[in-house]
Amino acid sequence: MNSTFNNLIVISIFSMLLIACVGDKTPINAELDNALTKSVLRASKDNTLSYYILPSETDFDNIPQEPSNPLNQAKVDLGKFLFFDTGIAQDALFESGIGTYSCATCHVPEAGFKPGNFQGIADGGLGFGINGEDRVMNYEDYQEADLDVQSARPLSLLNVAFVNNTFWNGQFGATDVNEGTEDMWGVLDHPTELNHLGLMGLETQNIEGMIVHRMRVDKEIADEFGYTEMFDSAFPDLAGQDTLYSNTYASFAISAYLRTVLSNKAPFQDWLKGKSNAMTAEEKEGAILFFNKANCSRCHYEPNLGSLEFHALGVKDMYQLDLFDAHPDDLRNRGRAGFTNNPEDEFKFKVPGIYNVDNLNDQKFLFHGASMQSVRELLEYKNEAVSENPNIANEMLSDKFEPLFLTDSEITKLEAFLVNGLRDPDLTRYAPDEVPSGQCFPNADPESLRDLGCE
């Protein structure tokens, strides 16, 4: 009897202490939420939290889109298949490369729609690993100059609907920051003559990308892989016309699909929608730093937490890391100036969106030259604001790139927000279960077949 009574007293006391602890936490969390709310409202262009809320992937009315390429579900579905289908890799340099890669080879959902390694290798690559980290060069059939690689790290395709001018230098697209640059379209080595089509950046870049990445869609391929009826449904006004089954309309479909690839399940998104417990206290404190002391939102202020500003941060180029087919004279190293040829744009690169900036594997490659290999390293670099590139003196750096004076504890909190608060955990929902060609995806070379379990 006494033992039972004593146990009840202990349980009662523990319960009271637990309630007291919860009570202690409530005002702290409320204080954090209030502080973060004020910070977000102050940074928002329209002074609302909803400014930063990304639409649902099916909310076509609220997803930014190219007027001449309006979204419809059939078009999105077609683009989703084409993005992952290795069957359209028809123009590989050598026979061993035909049908072995796809757009998703270099834009892996599990890696935040970026490569899982330093560089993405499309044609001329072998293997995949788990998230693309084991992609290597096919040394047996290809020389380094044969590879379809880029000497600037591919940007994430997440939330690209909110990016009007694409590429690190913003060269693609006829609107927005490229208005007034018409005299430079197609002048330098970069293939920007397609800007004369008058399209937004995503559609423009994807038309060019079908050629650059050695892919091909025509009526024969559409018939062979079961795409003909899908093209007809996606573009009903052109159904049956031979011009429909082409790289141009394939790129339109891929662009439509990519506009729906949105990181709207990230904890920060849930918090914006009213779920206070979606982020931890540490993540909220990091978010407050993002919008206040660290002032990240000074540049990362669009709904995708990127912008169409260009800044010189003094980071290294890929050739300085001795990566595939990267050269010191590559125009990409000049940033915006590689497109405009304007000395004032020298070494300035576009501010990228930062959702899912942290890959799921241990290999994280950040900035255009892949010179940073963790978010922590990136934050420490920005905290110091000193150039690491010997070709870029400190006086050439952006006036927005200045020491942040963050403590180690504050860097840890900011890191928590960037890594966890901005990570959508379910990006595989944007990948199909299979593709019409029936081939393995996103790669179908012999090593990838083993890695992906497609043998």
Image (cartoon, grey):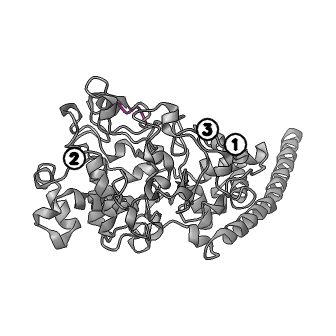
Is residue 31 visible to the viewer in this orientation of the structure? Answer: yes
Q: Secondary structure at mark 1?
A: helix
Q: Is residue 213 left or right of residue 26?
A: left
Spot occupied by residue 405 in the image (x, y as percentages of width and height): 78, 49
Q: Nearer the viewer, residue 394 or 10?
A: 394
Where does label 1 land, which residue? 380
Q: Is residue 298 left or right of residue 219?
A: right
Judge whether residue 140 is colored magenta. no
Spot occupied by residue 223 in the image (x, y as percentages of width and height): 11, 53
Report the residue at 60% width, 64% height from top.
301
Q: Earlier in the sequence, mark 3 or mark 2?
A: 2
Spot occupied by residue 218 in the image (x, y as percentages of width and height): 14, 54
Which residue type does callout 3 highlight?
Pro
**How many residues crowd mark 1 within 10 Å: few (<14), some (14–19), many (20+)?**
some
Where does label 3 land, which residue? 390
Q: Mainly helix, strand or loop, the magenta region?
A: loop
Where does label 2 land, which residue? 88
Q: Which is in the foreground here, disc 1 or disc 2?
A: 1
Q: Nearer the viewer, residue 387 or 306?
A: 387
